[in-house]
Amino acid sequence: MVGNGYCRSAYDNCVYHKKHSNGSYVYLLLYVDDMLIAAKDMSEINKLKTQLSGEFEMKDLGAAKKIIEMEIQRDRKAGKLSLSQKGYLEKVMERFGMQSLKPVNTPLAAHFKLSAALSPQTEEEVEHMSRVPYASGVGSIMYAMVCTRPDISHAVSVVSRYMDNPGKAHWQAVKWILHYLRGTTDVGIIFDRSNNTSGSVIGYVDSDFAGDLDRRRSLTGYVFTFASGAISWKAALQSKVVLSTTEAEYMAATEAVKEAIWLTGLV
């Protein structure tokens, strides 16, 4: 419990909520020094702002349009809300001097067969890759993936495996992802109120058996949606090597079920 009748969510320490006698809620969402307040009644939002400003030095930016590099657009008439990172991705392209990249249609083409065998083998190759901003590039696209771009989850999972010792082929794969993002900066996540009649979280899960060329580990991939928009996703290698597609599917399903339990509790 916290002050003024607000409770901290048992499922997420950054979420606080207060229930009124009429059954409506006020939600307070915190991320470091950024804050979002959501409620059906604007007077409740203003009341909470007044309470908080009396305790802390705050700047009221009005209706939310951007938070942690995510751009928020609302169509109240259509009942839709969208999240994207166009501005952030354009800054990434500028940082790496790739504003004029030719777009491609897939996050990672089928001809990329990445493995540790493609890491530098000579001192000349090591010297060359030491000047390549591989970690910075992967980190930049990873942030987009975490926030609004589940479509690049698998690609980011692949290139992030070689952070310790990347080779030229690995860097080419990172640049391919940037090519894809160059042509899809407007892509984001859309939540549609009309597709939320059940108020339920819907999930999908699958596995890729022994897809890792280095240690033959399988991949777990899942995505959960709410109001037709993605709210949680993952593409990562499984912790153990399995001996059949059945085992890989069970391990993937287990991870997805754990995430489903947490998400349904949060909702």
Image (tube, rainbow, N blue to C red):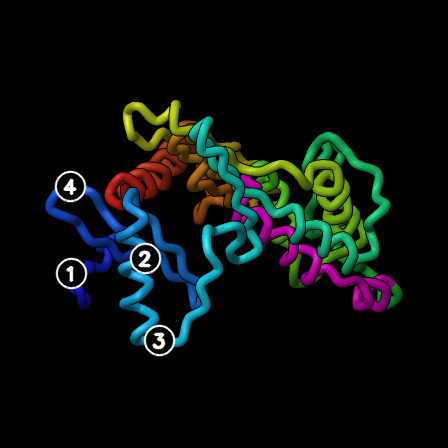
Q: Is most of the magenta stretch helix, strand or loop? A: helix
Which residue does the numbered mark 4 point to in the structure image?
A: 23
Identify the residue under disc 2: 46
In the displayed structure, 156 sits above or below 59; it is above
Q: 137 or 9: nearer the eye? A: 9
Per the rendering, the mark at residue 56 is 3
Crowd class of label 2 (few under 14; some 14 to 19; many from 20; radius 10 Å): few
* Residue kind at label 4, given as amino acid type: Gly
Q: Is residue 17 above or below residue 255?
A: below
Amino acid type indicated by mark 2: Asn
Looking at the rendering, the stretch of residues picked out in magenta corresponds to 125-150
View extreme (left): residue: 21
N-terminal label among 2 and 1: 1
Say which residue appears at 75% left-offset and 63% top-offset.
133
* Residue that mark 1 sits on: 5
Tell which residue pokes out farthest to the right in this image: 124
Q: CA distance from mark 2 to mark 1?
A: 16 Å
Secondary structure beneath dot 3 equals: loop
For residue 105, above or below residue 50: above
